[in-house]
Amino acid sequence: MTAAFIKHISKTLPLPESDLVSFLSKFKTVHLKKGEHFIKEGQLKKELGLIVKGCMLCYYNKDGEEVIDEFSLDHEFITDYFGYLVNAPAEKNVKCIEDTELLVLPFESLKSEFSNNPDYEKIGRIMAEGLFINSHQKLKSLMLDDAETRYLKLIAKRPDLLQRVPQYLIASYLNVKPETLSRIRSKASSKRFLDVGQ
């Protein structure tokens, strides 16, 4: 783990550096190729992943179609948290859309670490709160915002997605057709051009 990686993770998990390094040392390194799965629907795999470098997507199967739930990039956690909480097989899939390096820790080991160190228990709370906030914001946006607003919010929050994720996957995430997203992107680009020219 590089100093730069530790610095990035400390923004999410505000712990003393020595505690953070000690916590991350419990993880094992896993390398997955583009197209490989970290989690597959129906699995009882209960592991927490932390992306060192790469890009992954979470999706559900609906009549043979992939319905995108979320994307995860460098320095972000990824897991099937719902399946872990209810002790059920995974309902979603987690697949790499780039070659990806992960740090992985089984939830049973994570629970043991929480019991042994109160500071690590704080990590669990922060991760759970982050998952809830992201889920709440997405659900609220789907209910209240039009497609253009959802797109503008996404690129404002995560501009790097546009360079790393195919447009048809972003369209699925926003719950719009690819051609609708093309029109929205064209309109947004034209507006930025006009704003710069004024």
Image (tube, grey):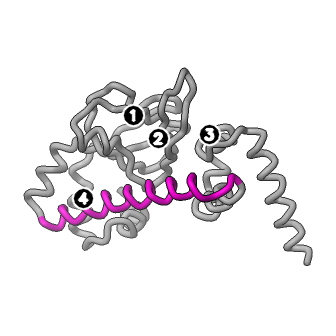
- The magenta stretch is 118-147
In depth, the one of 60 and 17 nearer the eye is: 60
Q: Residue furthest bottom?
A: 198
Q: Is residue 42 left or right of residue 122?
A: right
Q: Is residue 59 left or right of residue 162?
A: left
Look at label 1 and name its amino acid.
Phe
Which label sits on residue 100?
2
Please report the residue visible at 48 percent of the width from the left and 53 percent of the height from the top: 74
Check disc 1 and report the residue beneath it: 38
Tell me, yes or no, whether the two marked residues, 2 and 1, touch with CB atoms within 8 Å: yes
Look at label 3 and name its amino acid.
Ser
In depth, the one of 35 and 148 nearer the eye is: 148
Query: On screen, 163 above or below 168?
Result: below
Which secondary structure, mark 3? helix
Check disc 3 and report the residue beneath it: 172
Check disc 4 and report the residue beneath it: 124
Please report the residue visible at 50 percent of the width from the left and 46 percent of the height from the top: 70
Q: Is residue 54 left or right of residue 169?
A: left
Disc 2 packing (10 Å; few <14; some 14–19; many ≥20): many
Q: Measure the alpha-carbon separation of dots 2 and 1.
A: 10 Å
Residue depth check, mark 2 versus mark 3: number of the one nearer the observer? 3
Look at label 2 and name its amino acid.
Thr
Q: Position of residue 185 (x, y in %)?
A: 78, 52
Which secondary structure, mark 1? strand
